Amino acid sequence: MQHFDSVVGQSPPALAQADALVPHLYEMAKEVPLYAATAARARLSKIQTQALATQRQSGCMSWPSVRALLLLRLFTLVFPPSDHRHPVLAPAAIVVGGLLGQCPLADSADAAAALFLCGIAHTLAVRYDPNPDLSLQG
């Protein structure tokens, strides 16, 4: 997961290389689920901490970086979204919902991040979640 993080953290992100890592990360997560969940939850905590830090400084949350968006997407590919109380995806759904509900849409980059998060929220949703609809209303 650390290598995936460094690959998508490049400018521009090496998406082909990141895509090639996904099947291997999926298999590794099946072999050592506790370690994979612990590492993923640490990344989720970092994403949420960064969003809350910008909220404290500027009064509103900022949209996550491309790296954070791709990590959130990775979690939906590696862990089973059908598990309603999954130790990674349940907190991820809360983080995604919070970002969609509290980040303002100021420009086209924000709209792109919001649409990407809406797709993730749709994957994570076990029942109707109003945050994607509300965030797109601006």
Image: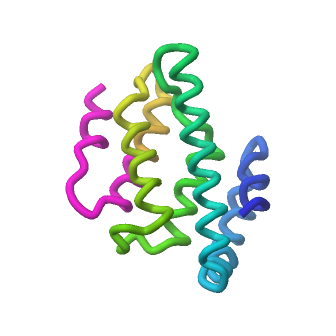
Q: Quadrant of residue 136?
A: top left
Q: Where's residue 51, x and y in %? A: 54, 32
Q: Decide whether residue 127 is among the magenta residues.
A: yes
Q: Where's residue 75, x and y in %? A: 54, 63
Which sits in the foreground, 50 or 38?
38
Quick check: 83 left or right of 42?
Answer: left
Say above or below: 88 vs 33.
above
- Residue at image position (69%, 78%) is 24
Q: Residue furthest top?
A: 58
Quick check: 98 left or right of 8?
Answer: left
Which residues are the magenta region?
A: 118-138
Classified by dominant secondary structure, the portion drawn in magenta counts as: helix
Which sits in the foreground, 111 or 46?
46
Q: How is the image coloured?
A: rainbow
- Residue at image position (51%, 72%) is 79
Q: Where's residue 89, x and y in %? A: 45, 62
Instruction: Name the quarter where the C terminus is drawn.
Output: top left
Instruction: Name the quarter where the N terminus is drawn.
Output: bottom right
Quick check: 133 left or right of 53?
Answer: left
Which sits in the foreground, 7 or 102?
102
- Residue at image position (55%, 71%) is 78
Say above or below: 117 vs 18.
above
Q: Where's residue 36, x and y in %? A: 64, 70
Say above or below: 57 vs 111.
above
Q: Decide whether residue 102 is among the magenta residues.
A: no
Number of on-image labels: 0
- Residue at image position (50%, 62%) is 88
